[in-house]
């Protein structure tokens, strides 16, 4: 692309973003185009000034498919698309108050959002209760990140939380 | 020693067979000499003589009509023999071990072929002519459809469609490559003189190649069912074997037509017609199948009143789809596969549990039976001197090329595919995929269908096909398992269902759709969610019964299944301790719905097949056909009548009692009598327990931990309306408080914690003596029912500060004990005990010991 260098200049901290997230520069450009597309008022922020481009990229980086040939250097852990980071992201989707634990109420909220129309409130309660019971190993009635990780160890997160074209 | 028993059994069977066959043989000899024996022989030629001779000697009192039943007899006999392998072992441990040992090394299909050899040999020896061969008609019309219908019905749809791209590539391009390369290479070799003098033209080679190219679904199932490879690998091979029928049919017909036409008449038009016919055959077949699948679904929606014959429809319509496609010269296998795949979801949702079970078992039985017969026939057909033509070069070269080209084809195609796949197929997986390209009965059937007049060397081709089939099924079958283990192929994961996993999966799906939307790409997940939307709103609406539609959620399924599992465990645990007390009261066991019992088994299997089904018979969870083994295990758990009773009772509590709670808010309307009795009985029992536990309380026997757990869980259940949510919250804090308390020291502090609850709201759910089942954690639903009645006293205690007029109580009851909605009911119901309580209760805040005494 002839205009690549000039476009890249438009993106602040492009190199830094690329290093941190593992996206290639072509990808970054594509994402920038999309960002601009979504950002209709050209404010540089999405969603009422909460998400700027670098956050946008960082979040999307979580969904890159994990690199199969894992090199065991320390840098791998920092990439957003490692398994742990993906799990952390998923964990944060539940843990709305960011206290590091998924409480019953938070779980209920997620459940309600997904199933609310089909089930009664009591059944939701039971399901949430049961889910916590299963995962909660230290019996503090909430699911910490480690417990969450443990209960999902059989799930193939790498596949489930990846979008192919973000490679 | 182990082998001895097994071998003995085989020997016995063979001896029996010989005894049966030899009178026939003897008779054959004798009748030739024209004797008057009444035994008839297997060939029809002497029938008239026989009839004549029997008439001449008078009325036979009993006659041995062998020829009458011969075919059916032998077929049934050797099927029983095969199944005896499974029945006998139940009686004899050694035979079990021997059986497992043998079938774990040698796949059943190989054994069956060998058995077919033996049988064929015997019949050959008896008759000097092979009376039993696998004719194409019998095979394609009577034996194959069941196996394929079974495959389609139990196909894991989600897995299949996720990998559909890869499967199609392998099925279409791979098969074409196999056919072309094989035909051309053989022809080249003939030109080069490696095969001696054969009268086969290029077109005939191509025809031969096309019938050899197809991977056979029956063989794949038979071999892979013992080797549990991971899901993706299995579905790739299996899906390919099913879908390549479309290509095979087209190729076979096209080349057959070309052979008839002869070389010179083939021009571009014909070739184009060939290509067009591929699309027509493949898509036409699929559409026919889909149509029949939809028809079945519609039918099951409307057959509420004829549940007994519901299962029959599935089989008949499935078979009809096969025949219709066959009639229209479309791909029959594709048709029946899609029929099965399309209807599975709706059939399972619409039909009664019993019918679903019936369909599943019957299908498995038919499929198994057909497979057995197919392989045995394959063995028998070999023992026929008429067809044997041996040409070393041809046969060996065919074998070599089949293997080599399979490997090349798979590796090349997978390399291309991996560039587009999210999860690439690994090297070892590819090796197994290539090695798993087994040829089977379909190839043989097609070979026999060749026209001898057009193809002079038909027998050679038939022989070669047989040899290739034996090689792949027996040799590759036996070595498959060691190869899988040696290469450390990823095996199928044994999954246990977990609510959190299911929930997170669901959440991931939603998240991915959102991300795809944000990044502006139409991806896999977007399509999937669109399809789901369409399917839920339109197709389910038309094809599913309204009642079934409401229950459609996987998360709920998992939950229900886990609940049932708990209930079962509770029952067995309770029985171990000697009794399930409430079961003793006969009055409370009413109205057992058989439904819930079979539901438990079905939920196990249905839910599991929801996840992913791999077709094999082991005790792995995700397999639909596991039913027999798992079914037995669960059956053992529920064998006693009391266990069943208790289970039904629990089931009632699980879902019914909630509704009953809601009714109770209406004070003018009572529930049906049996519940009253039940609650009363439970109440009395817990009263008794409380008496006992108060005495033991003084000695500080029981740990409070379990108790507190109950309360917390209890709190969960009792939030029927928004208003009570706040109450629940405060009682939560009450909980924490009480938990902290009782966790710390413990003596007679049962009551203490009760009054700790903040805001004057008693924690009515706190049941200190709620462990008639000792340390067993009481599942919430049970705890709740017990609390129903025992609440009577406590709730009253809770209102200790208020004027105790009945109207007051009633008014306050729902507010204060919002979680205990039973109050209004129980209050009305058991006024006398309340009075007793109120008299004896001292005002708050109460010190414990006096309270205890007062209570007692």
Image (cartoon, helix red, strand yellow):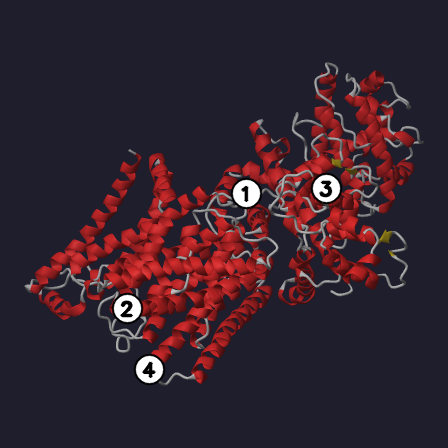
Residue at 33% x, 46% y: name it: B84
- Image quadrant in which the C terminus of chain B is located: top right
Q: Chain of mark 4?
A: B
Q: Chain of mark 2?
A: B
Question: How many numbered dots are placed on residues in this image?
Answer: 4
Residue B683 placement: quadrant: top right
Circles 1 and 4: CB distance less than 8 Å? no
Question: Does label 2 lie on the same chain as label 1?
Answer: yes
Q: Nearer the viewer, mark 2 or mark 3?
A: 2
Question: Which comes before the other along the chain, label 1 or label 2?
Answer: 2
Residue B628 spot, x, y in % from top left = 47, 46
Q: Nearer the viewer, residue A86 or B345?
A: A86
Q: Nearer the viewer, residue B180 or B619?
A: B180
Q: Chain of mark 1?
A: B
- The residue identified by callout 2 is B192
Question: Which comes before the other along the chain, label 4 or label 2?
Answer: 2
- The residue identified by callout 1 is B494
Residue B604 spot, x, y in % from top left = 57, 46
Q: Which mark is residue B443?
A: none
- The residue identified by callout 3 is A78
Residue B575 placement: quadrant: top right
- The residue identified by callout 4 is B262
Q: Nearer the viewer, residue B449 or B758?
A: B449
Q: Is B359 rendered above or below residue B565?
A: below
Give the alpha-carbon distance from disc 2 to disc 3, as whole Å. 62 Å
Q: What secondary structure is found at the residue carrying circle 3? A: helix
Question: Does label 4 lie on the same chain as label 3?
Answer: no
Q: Nearer the viewer, mark 3 or mark 1?
A: 3
Q: Residues within 10 Å of mark 4 (few under 14, many from 20)?
A: some
């Amino acid at each position: 692309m002839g205009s690549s260098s000039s476009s890249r200049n438009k993106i602040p901290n492009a190199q830094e973003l690329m290093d941190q997230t593992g996206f290639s520069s072509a990808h970054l450009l594509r994402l920038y185009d999309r960002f601009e597309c979504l950002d209709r008022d050209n404010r540089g922020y999405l969603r009422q000034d909460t998400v700027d481009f670098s956050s946008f990229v960082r979040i999307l980086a979580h969904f890159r498919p994990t690199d199969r040939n894992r090199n065991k250097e320390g840098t791998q852990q920092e990439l957003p698309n490692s398994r742990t980071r993906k799990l952390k992201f998923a964990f944060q989707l539940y843990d709305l108050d960011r206290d590091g634990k998924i409480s019953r109420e938070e779980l209920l909220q997620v459940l309600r959002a997904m199933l609310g129309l089909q089930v009664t409130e009591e059944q939701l309660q039971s399901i949430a209760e049961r889910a916590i019971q299963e995962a909660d190993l230290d019996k503090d009635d909430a699911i910490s990140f480690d417990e969450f990780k443990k209960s999902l160890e059989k799930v193939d997160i790498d596949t489930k939380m990846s979008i192919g074209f973000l490679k | 020693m182990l082998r001895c028993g097994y071998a003995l059994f085989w020997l016995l069977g063979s001896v029996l067979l010989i005894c049966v066959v030899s009178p026939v043989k003897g008779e054959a000899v004798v009748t030739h000499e024209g004797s008057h024996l009444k035994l008839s022989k297997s060939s029809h030629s002497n029938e008239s003589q026989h009839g004549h001779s029997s008439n001449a000697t008078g009325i036979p009192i009993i006659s041995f009509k062998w020829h009458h039943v011969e075919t059916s007899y032998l077929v049934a006999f050797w099927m029983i023999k095969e199944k005896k392998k499974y029945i006998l072992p139940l009686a004899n441990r050694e035979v079990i071990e021997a059986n497992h040992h043998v079938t774990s090394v040698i796949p059943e299909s190989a054994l069956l072929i060998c058995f077919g050899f033996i049988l064929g040999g015997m019949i050959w020896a008896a008759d000097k002519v092979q009376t039993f061969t696998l004719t194409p008609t019998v095979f394609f019309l009577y034996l194959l459809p069941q196996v394929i219908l079974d495959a389609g019905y139990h196909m894991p749809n989600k897995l299949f469609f996720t990998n559909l791209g890869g499967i199609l590539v392998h099925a279409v391009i791979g098969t074409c490559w196999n056919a072309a390369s094989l035909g051309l290479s053989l022809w080249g070799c003939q030109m080069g003189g490696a095969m001696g003098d054969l009268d086969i033209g290029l077109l005939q080679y191509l025809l031969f190649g096309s019938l050899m190219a197809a991977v056979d679904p029956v063989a794949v199932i038979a071999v892979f069912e013992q080797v549990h490879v991971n899901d993706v690998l299995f579905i790739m091979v299996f899906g390919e074997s099913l879908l390549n029928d479309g290509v095979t049919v087209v190729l076979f017909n096209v080349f057959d037509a070309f052979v008839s036409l002869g070389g010179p008449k083939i021009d571009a038009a014909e070739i184009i017609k060939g290509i067009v016919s591929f699309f027509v055959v493949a898509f036409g077949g699929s559409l026919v199948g889909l149509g029949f699948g939809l028809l079945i679904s519609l039918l099951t929606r409307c057959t509420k009143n004829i549940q007994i014959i519901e299962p029959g429809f599935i089989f008949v319509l499935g078979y009809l789809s096969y025949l219709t496609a066959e009639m229209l010269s479309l791909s029959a296998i594709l048709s029946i596969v899609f029929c099965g795949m399309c209807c599975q979801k709706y059939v399972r949702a619409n039909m009664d549990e019993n019918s679903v079970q019936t369909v599943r078992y019957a299908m498995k039985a038919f499929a198994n039976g057909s497979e057995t017969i197919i392989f045995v026939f394959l063995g028998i057909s070999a023992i026929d001197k008429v067809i044997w033509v041996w040409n070393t070069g041809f046969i060996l070269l065919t074998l070599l090329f089949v293997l080599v080209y399979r490997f090349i084809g798979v590796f090349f195609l997978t390399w291309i595919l991996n560039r587009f796949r999210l999860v690439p197929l690994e090297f070892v997986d590819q090796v197994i995929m290539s090695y798993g390209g087994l040829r089977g009965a379909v190839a043989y059937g097609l070979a026999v269908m060749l026209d001898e007049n057009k193809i002079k060397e038909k027998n050679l081709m038939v022989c070669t096909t047989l040899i290739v089939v034996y090689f792949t099924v027996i040799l590759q079958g036996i070595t498959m398992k060691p190869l899988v283990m040696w290469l450390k192929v990823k095996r199928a994961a044994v999954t246990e269902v977990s609510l959190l996993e299911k929930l997170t999966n669901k959440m991931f799906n939603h998240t991915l759709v959102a991300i795809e939307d944000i990044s502006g790409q139409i991806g896999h997940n977007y399509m999937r969610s669109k399809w789901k939307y369409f399917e839920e709103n339109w197709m389910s609406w038309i094809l599913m019964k309204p009642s079934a539609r409401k229950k459609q959620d996987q998360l709920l399924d998992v939950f229900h299944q886990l609940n049932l599992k708990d209930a079962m465990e509770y029952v067995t645990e309770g029985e171990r301790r000697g009794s399930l007390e409430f079961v003793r009261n006969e009055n409370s066991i009413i109205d057992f719905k058989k439904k819930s019992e079979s539901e438990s088994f079905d939920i196990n299997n249905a839910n599991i097949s929801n996840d992913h089904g791999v077709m094999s018979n082991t005790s792995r969870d995700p397999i639909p056909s596991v039913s027999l083994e798992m079914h037995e295990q669960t059956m053992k758990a529920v064998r006693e009548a009391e266990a069943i009773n208790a289970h039904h009772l629990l089931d009632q509590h699980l879902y019914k009692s909630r509704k009953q709670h809601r009714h109770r808010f209406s004070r003018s309307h009572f529930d049906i009598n049996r519940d009253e009795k039940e609650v009363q009985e439970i109440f009395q029992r817990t009263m008794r327990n409380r008496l006992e536990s108060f005495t033991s309380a003084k000695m500080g026997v029981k740990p409070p931990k379990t108790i507190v757990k109950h309360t917390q869980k209890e709190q969960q259940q009792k939030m029927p309306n928004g208003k009570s949510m706040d109450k629940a919250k405060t009682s939560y804090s009450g909980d924490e408080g009480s938990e902290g308390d009782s966790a710390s020291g413990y003596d007679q502090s049962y009551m203490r914690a009760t009054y700790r609850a903040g805001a004057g709201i008693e924690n009515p759910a706190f049941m200190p003596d709620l462990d008639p089942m000792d340390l067993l954690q009481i599942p919430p639903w049970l705890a709740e029912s017990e609390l129903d009645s025992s609440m009577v006293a406590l709730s009253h205690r809770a209102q200790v500060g208020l004027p105790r007029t009945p109207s007051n109580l009633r008014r306050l009851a729902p507010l204060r004990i919002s979680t205990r909605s039973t109050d209004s009911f129980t209050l009305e119901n058991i006024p006398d005990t309340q009075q007793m309580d109120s008299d004896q209760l001292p005002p708050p805040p109460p010190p414990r010991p006096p309270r205890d005494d007062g209570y007692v």
